[in-house]
Amino acid sequence: MATHEAKPKIMACDFEVRGKVPKEAFELFAVAQAKVLGIRGYITRVSEDLYKGQLQGEGKVIEAFKKVIASAAEYVAAVKEFIIKNMKVIEEYTYKAFEVRA
């Protein structure tokens, strides 16, 4: 008999990355990592040393994204903080992919 596993909950959160990271390279890296992990949402550069955005995905995947960004060798010295805020469960995705917003 097939067992029905509970579908993993979709989480949504806002995030901030602080630090002097190289703009284009960091944005491409964030998008590539989000794609690998299956995360949806966006990232936008607010100022020279601040990015903000939203993430949508399973909780463990969001945590994995945070770890990857915070520990990436090429950015580890530049990223001062990665803050996740307003984590909540959502019924369905509101983004089709992960993108960079101007």
Image: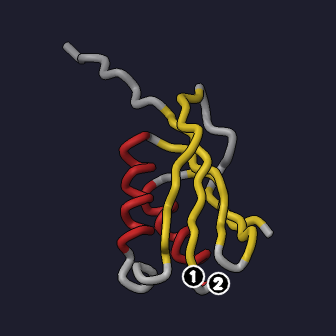
The colour scheme of the drawn protein is: secondary structure
Give the amino acid type for the residue marked by disc 1 in the picture. Val
Q: Nearer the viewer, mark 1 or mark 2?
A: 1
Instruction: Give left or right: position of 6 versus 56.
Output: left
Please give the label number shown on residue 21.
1
Most distant residue in the top direction: 1
Callout 1: 10 Å neighbours few (<14), some, many (20+)?
Answer: many
Callout 2: 10 Å neighbours few (<14), some, many (20+)?
Answer: few
Please give the label number shown on residue 24.
2
Towards the viewer: 98 or 55:
55
Residue, x 61% and y 48% (percent of image)? 14
Residue 69: image location, x then y, percent:
44, 68
Residue 94: image location, x then y, percent:
68, 39
Residue, x 67% and y 46% (percent of image)? 95
Q: Quadrant of residue 7?
A: top left
Residue, x 45% and y 49% (percent of image)? 62
